Image (spheres, rainbow, N blue to C red):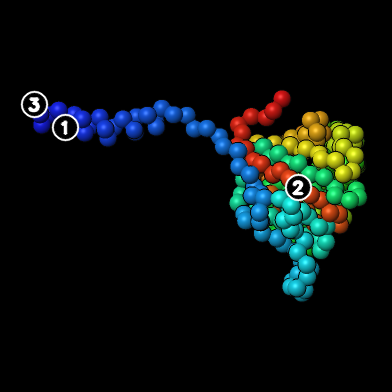
Amino acid sequence: MTRVLHCLAAVIVISSPLDASAEEPSVPKTISLFNGKNLTGWHSDVPHRDKHPDAKDSFIVRDGMLVSLGTPNGHLITDQVYENYRLEVEYRFAAKPGNCGVLVHASTPRALYKMYPKSIEVQMNHTHAGDFWCIVQDITVPNMVERRGPKENWGITEGKARRILNLTDGSENPVGEWNSMNIECIGNAVKVWVNGDLVNHGTECTASKGQLALQAEGSEVEFRKLELSPIKQFTE
């Protein structure tokens, strides 16, 4: 009898943790893409440095923020590929208004103008935040002719109509103040909010996953938040 009880106890000890873990639902975890200290998890692609390896870095960490210095032009790209996520970004133009962007579904480097990776750009250019730019990928929105121009000019390569206007240019805060930009990507659809306003919603995107990238495109931009959460449905 004692031997039987010991065996039963062993079974209970071994099987209980397995049963408990099987019942626990998986909980989506938000991750920070920037650790506040260095650029671990990212790599830069700055064509100017091919011939000028001693040129200054385009992306640095300063006072706990990730900073795009704007020049030399290029991109800071995540090492990992992501799909079905919400990306929460908080940014500001540090000194004067200018240009920058967040690229989603990034893949082939230097696919456009020997500079831009194949992707969909979510524009951050001051007063135009939320525009889409098609970079060797495409996406569809309502009122395409109104927001992209004549259909015969559309395209995804050099010289084509690649810009798709956002729904509102009035959502940004004044220069020097922080802005929030939330980007949700599920399957072949992308939605963008700026300071809580829905500014774009595209479908039929020709990519559904890829790396994320930040631009150095002439203006100094500070980022204090870059958080990514897995999602299964869009925010309403």
- Cβ–Cβ below 8 Å for labels 3 and 1? no
Location of mark 1 (residue): 7
Residue 19 place in picture, x, y as percent: 34, 29
Residue positioned 60% across, 51% down in the render: 80
The image quadrant where one finds the N terminus is top left
Distance between the Cα atoms at labels 3 and 1? 10 Å
Q: Quadrant of residue 30?
A: top right
- Cβ–Cβ below 8 Å for labels 2 and 3? no
Q: Earlier in the sequence, mark 2 or mark 3?
A: 3
Residue 185 place in picture, x, y as percent: 68, 38
Distance between the Cα atoms at labels 2 and 3? 67 Å
Residue positioned 78% across, 67% down in the render: 56
Looking at the rendered structure, the secondary structure element under dot 2 is strand
Give neighbour class at mark 2: few <14, some 14-19, many 20+ (Cα, 10 Å): many
Q: What's under tag 1, amino acid-wise?
A: Cys
Q: What's under tag 3, amino acid-wise?
A: Met
Decide which of 16, 141 is in the foreground and name it: 16
Looking at the rendered structure, the secondary structure element under dot 3 is loop
Residue 1 is marked as 3
Residue positioned 87% across, 44% down in the render: 176
| Drawn side of residue 22 relative to residue 81, left or right | left
Q: Is residue 20 visible?
A: yes
Residue 223 is marked as 2
Q: Is residue 200 visible?
A: no
Residue 128 place in picture, x, y as percent: 88, 42
Residue positioned 41% across, 27% down in the render: 23
